[in-house]
Amino acid sequence: MADNNLPKKSILSAQIDLSKFSPATEEEKRQQDVMSESVTFFKDGMRKLFRNPLAVVSLIVLFCIIVTIIVAPLIVPYGYSEMLSIDGKRDKGAKNLRPFEFSKAEQQYIEKGNYRFPHIFGTDEQCRDYFIRVIYGTRVSLIVGLFASIIVLIIGMIYGSISGYLGGRTDLIMMRIVDIIYSLPDMLIIILLSVALNEVLVFASGSALAKIGTNMVSMFIVFGLLYWVTMARLIRGQILSIKQNEYILAAKSIGAKPGRIIRKHILPNCLSVIIISTALQIPSAIFTESYLSFVGLGVQAPMPSLGSLANAARAGLQSYPYKLVFPALTICLIVLSLNLLGDGLRDAFDPKLKR
């Protein structure tokens, strides 16, 4: 309803005639509140991610795998390097048992009224529970993938930010270094580092580094030396376009230091590239670790890895094919889930894909 107290509009005036407008209803106000809801970049990306069915299924699979590798060692009474025994005596008949199969000594032990935890995946050639070895192998692979992605993220983000922001001759020199690193054969470098570090590095007996071995330490060093270049190139390319914007010029004009400009203004606008590249780096690192363990350059025995388990199962493939199925299937599930999740993150957070 128009307000009668409003002044009348002059014919020659350019002012809007307020008598033609009426106050908004309560329903229109509520609709405006919904339409003007403030959503952050991260929240908007997560909404789109959860609308992607493949990404949601991948998250569920990864969650189940992570829960299993955390809870299973608390329930299963066997160790990854423990040879099966009964009443303190080694059970030599528990070699290469099939899934949920017991040895003769274990059957007699159960017939006496005792309880024996089943061998879910059977046992290996050294009378060790295969399920718990696959669990610990999955732990090793996921830790390697996560740790390698963190190394790649930190080094690539710092290097790419400096190169892209400074530009000029500094950028030219830094990018030529990246080109040289791209040309290095990573497999050869890993082999050389494993041989060289095996003579140099000496870890305390029983420590975590002693358990994973020199080969794994050299693998982490190679990830830190070689695998960050792709991340650095992506972030450099983003910064070259972002630093031309007006808000960067405004930050410079008020005396902001380059470190603060990169940290507060540039890197937050590269968040989509950082999230996507990090998510896709994890399955790549896991696959690399599995391959190296398969050829004998991964973790040292008796610590298992999915790649080393697959390599050990290759010898008895015709007699015990299930031993290869379990680690290979686990690798496929992890890598496929992380790749699908990375694709979902790209679709959700990449601003170029927004419609």
Image (spheres, grey):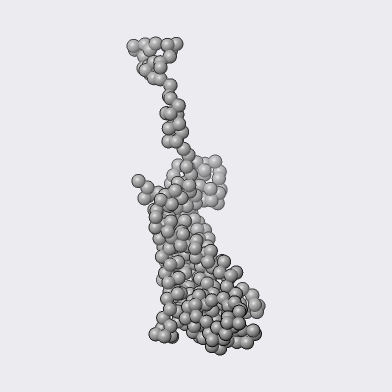
- Please state which of residues 126 and 219 is positioned toward the viewer in this rendering: 126
- In this view, 30 is above or below 139: above
- Please state which of residues 91 and 318 is positioned toward the viewer in this rendering: 91
- Please state which of residues 301 and 197 is positioned toward the viewer in this rendering: 301
Q: Quadrant of residue 112?
A: bottom right
Place of residue 167 in the rendered image (x, y in percent of width and height, measured from the top left):
45, 55
Name the residue at 60% across, 69% down: 74
Please state if 335 lies on the left or on the right of 205 as rendered: left
Place of residue 286 in the rendered image (x, y in percent of width and height, measured from the top left):
47, 69
- In this view, 56 is above or below 138: above
Residue 292 visible in image: no
Place of residue 249 in the rendered image (x, y in percent of width and height, measured from the top left):
48, 43
Which residue ends up furthest to the bottom in the rendered image? 92
Q: Quadrant of the N terminus?
A: top left
Place of residue 343 in the rendered image (x, y in percent of width and height, measured from the top left):
40, 58
Please state if 194 lies on the left or on the right of 6 as rendered: right
Name the residue at 52% across, 82% down: 102
Q: Quadrant of residue 11?
A: top left
Name the residue at 65% across, 77% down: 206
- In this view, 229 is above or below 167: below
- In this view, 17 is above or below 292: above
- Please state which of residues 233 and 28 is positioned toward the viewer in this rendering: 28
Please state if 302 lies on the left or on the right of 32 as rendered: right
Residue 104 visible in image: yes
Name the residue at 53% across, 70% down: 139
Numbered label tally: 0
